[in-house]
Image (spheres, rainbow, N blue to C red):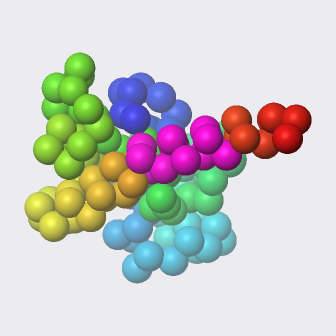
Amino acid sequence: YWRGGTLDYSMGVRSVCSVQPKHGGSCSIDKIAETLPLYLSKPMLLLSETVGRPPMIDYASTVLYNWARVDKNGPISMSNVRCVLRLTGLIDEEWFFKTHVVIESEASHAVAAVIAASRTDD
């Protein structure tokens, strides 16, 4: 869920804006320091280390921390979720990522049921 100003959001913005386009999608930490100027690569590497993720576009940046509800009181559904950042700007991309948001939301019920079942004495 998108919360502007968080480290995870910052990670998504930095990975989209400065990392991927510079070296053709490689996630090598050595390459990022060689390719980007230090004023971009050092903060990106520090942020990456802080959030515990590699300095690249990942599932967390494109899905988990990249959505907001259109109607804040409405359900998590395809028609009520939007992507905050898009790589290409294409609607197909938005639908692709939104599908994952809705799947994650629906799967949370199954995960909660499994956890509850594992805590019973039966």
Kindly identify the residue that appears in the image at 17 percent across and 26 percent down.
71
Q: Is residue 46 left or right of residue 36?
A: right
Which span is picked out in magenta?
A: 104-114
| Residue 27 point in image, percent of width and height | 56, 71
Observer able to see residue 98? yes
> In the image, is residue 83 above or below residue 87?
above
Residue at 61% in and 38% down = 112
State the image coordinates of residue 96 (x, y, percent, origin top left): 27, 64
Name the image quarter holding residue 73: top left
Q: Quick check: 70 above or below 55?
A: above
Residue depicted at 34% across the width and 49% down the height: 102
Nearest the viewer among 60 and 114 is: 114
**Residue in the foreground of this view, choosing between 13 and 45:** 13
Q: Residue at x 48, y 58 (%)?
A: 59
- Residue lying farthest to the front in this orientation: 122
Query: Which quarter of the rendered picture does the N terminus lie within?
Result: top left
Q: Where is residue 56 drawn, in percent x and y?
A: 51, 62
